[in-house]
Amino acid sequence: MTADEVRKVSDSRVLAAMAHPLRRRLMDVLKVHGPATASVLAGATGQAIGNVSHHLRVLGECGLIEEAPELARDRRERWWRLVSRGVRWSTSDFQDDPATAAVADAAQSLNLDHQVGQVRGWFAASDDDKERWRDCTFAMDQWLHLTPEELRELGEEINELLERWRRRQAPDAGGRQPVFVFAYGVPGKP
């Protein structure tokens, strides 16, 4: 697997490990800023280095991150990087066992909490922080009438669009910063 691929998770222990809020945040920092040491990650998350080191080991044991020894300046320095660009899972892969099904359901719920938390964090930002981005952020929702196959197709199209934007070769113009984008499509009742 290359760092540019998305890993399919089928082990509930991996889901449980990455569902922890700090571990998820560490993975986000690595995704946005690239490889880092525990001390850099501690600074980025406001956590103690020992706490961050513990969570990095857990993520490493699950194969979500790996050491990047070629970045170290000496034998004491430990750099970490993501193994893949992201992860995906299907709760249907965990339905054979009630315990693993519960882990998958909890991971999915915690993932949604994390995503909504990113948006709520933006809503809580100061007016000065928001000023430059005021007319370009977006939120949307639609009620569509779809079959399961059509919903799958829509999800693939949205994923392709986001992937095109992620991979684009854009000059490093001033003012670029990480932007969080997510979408959900689920059956619902109005």
Image (cartoon, grey):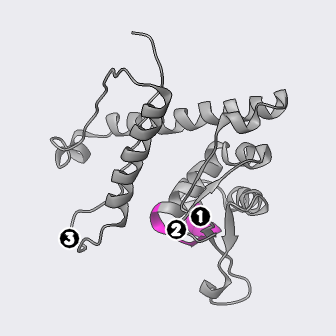
Q: Distance between the residues labelled 2 and 3?
A: 23 Å
The residue type indicated by label 2 comes to Asp
Image point 35% across, 34% down: which residue? 124
Segment colored magenta: 32-41
Q: Nearer the viewer, residue 65 or 120?
A: 65
Residue 180 visible from this viewpoint: yes
**In front of the other: label 2 or label 3?**
2
Locate residue 140, reporting x and y percent: 28, 30
Give whichever of discs 2 and 1 has the lower sequence position: 2
Is disc 2 in contact with disc 1, using a CB cutoff of under 8 Å?
Answer: yes
Quadrant including the C terminus: top left
Which residue is under mark 2? Answer: 4
Q: Which of 67 and 76 is in front in this view?
A: 67
Q: Mark 1 points at which residue?
A: 84
Q: Is the magenta stretch mostly helix, strand or loop?
A: helix
Left or right of residue 10: residue 82? left
Residue 189 image position (x, y, % from top left) = 44, 11
